[in-house]
Every structure is written in structure tokens, then in C-alpha cells.
Image (cartoon, rainbow, N blue to C red):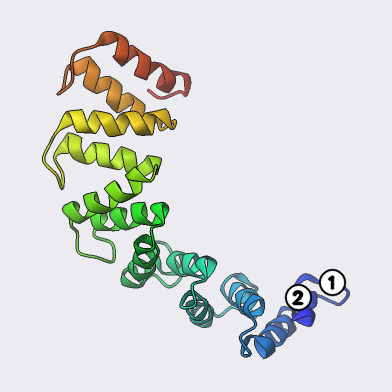
Amino acid sequence: YYLGRGHAEGLGVEKDLVRARDYYLSVAESDFLDSQVRLADLLSTGDPAVRDVTAAAGWYRRLADSGDRYARERLVQLHGSGGMLRNPQEAARWVRAAAQEGDAEYQRRLADYYQQGFGVPRDTREAVVWYRQAAKQGNAEAQLRLGEAYARGEGVARYTPEAARWYERAGNQGVVLAQVLLAQLYDRRDGVPHDVNLALRWYAPSAHSGSR
């Protein structure tokens, strides 16, 4: 393992990624976790001489199956949109696993997948289910998306007072779009009382941030 690090980083020896890969591999097979992570990283992002993204995914999968969160995220990146092994179903599998464990960010991402139909059938109602779970945990982006769902009547009955509630929560966390959308609701009297002062209050932060 230490010889692998030495050759990978040029510590005390000449940098040699091929040797680093071989040293990491020699101990990775014995379930030495740090070596497995370094091997997978080297195979997925290293020099073309050692790069083998498919093999990297195999090592990340082995780690992820044991509950390693970093490995799970790397699998999502590799299989996600723009990933080197783009596979929407596989990305959705790992996002769902984390979402079901209660991770708010992954719940929000799973909701996005349902909203977009990425790796799962497009289902706006299911998207709302996951946006709500993430929003209740304080995920600001999910609060914005849930507000938009209520404002548009997408995946849930249109109800702008509820949209305003979630916009306000996201706006209080600094989400500029939520601040603008909330201001517009008060400005247009869309399901909430017409209140110029509240509209100006919510327009102000977005104006300071440069939003138009």
C-alpha cells in the first residue's frame, strides 16, 4: 500500500502510476479499503497508461456494497449524465439507495431523476414525494422545487399558498429564485394577499445579488 502511494505521488521514489496500480492491486484483493479506494481513483482518473474506468467501477461497486458513501457518489458520477460510463439506470440505483437511507441531498437528486425521467420512468408525483422528504429536512433546492410544483400544479394539485410557504423557506436560506418567485406571488396576488411591502421585501435580496 505505502509503495503504491509512493509511486503514485512520487514520494521518495520516481513517480510511476503503473507500479502504483500494481502495488495497490496487490493489497486491494485482501480487502484493504484505503487501497481499494486509491486503486479505483487511479483507474478512473489517472494517466491513460493505467486508466480503466470499467475496472474502477467494479472496485467502487465493491466498496459501495459495503456502505462506502464516497464510492457510491463516484458510481453516480461515472454513470450519471456526462459520466464516462453513462448508465442512467445504474446512477438511479445508487441515488435511490442513499435516498432511502434518509440522505436529503440524494432525495432531492432522486426527485430530479423522476422529474426528468433519468434512469426511472418520468413521474412528477413521485418527484414531489422525494422533494417533500428532502425539503422537510431543510434541503433548500428541494424546497424551491416543491414550491414550483405547487405553483404549477405539477405532480400535486396547484395551491399557491403552499408554494409561497416553501418559497419562503428556500428564500430564507438564500435561494435567489425562490425569493423572486415569492415576491411575484405577493405582487400579482396569486393565491396570497396582495402585499406590496412583502413583495418589495423579497425582491430586495435578489436585487442585491444581481438577479434581474
Q: Is residue 3 left or right of residue 95?
A: right
Which residue in the protein does label 1 denote?
11
Q: Is residue 46 visible?
A: yes
Secondary structure at badge 1 equals loop
- Residue displayed at 49% across by 72% down: 67
The residues tagged by marks 2 and 1 sit, at their Cα atoms, a distance apart of: 8 Å
Give the residue type at disc 1. Leu
- The crowd level at tag 2 (other Cα within 10 Å; few <14, some 14-19, many 20+) is many
Q: In the picture, residue 119 is in which quadrant?
A: bottom left
From the image, tell me which residue sits under label 2: 5
The number of numbered discs placed on residues in the rendered structure image is 2
Relative to the observer, which residue lies in front, 40 or 147? Answer: 147
Q: Which amino acid is tagged 2?
A: Arg
Crowding at mark 1 (Cα within 10 Å: few <14, some 14-19, many 20+): few
Residue 174 % position (x, y) = 44, 30
- Give the structural element (helix, strand or loop) at label 2: helix
Up-down relation of residue 30 to residue 143 (above or below): below
Q: Is residue 177 visible?
A: no
The residue located at (52%, 77%) in the rendering is: 63
Q: Nearer the viewer, residue 160 or 21?
A: 160
Task: Determine contact: label 2, label 1, CB under 8 Å.
Answer: yes
Viewport quadrant of the C terminus: top left
**Residue 11: x and y, percent?**
84, 71
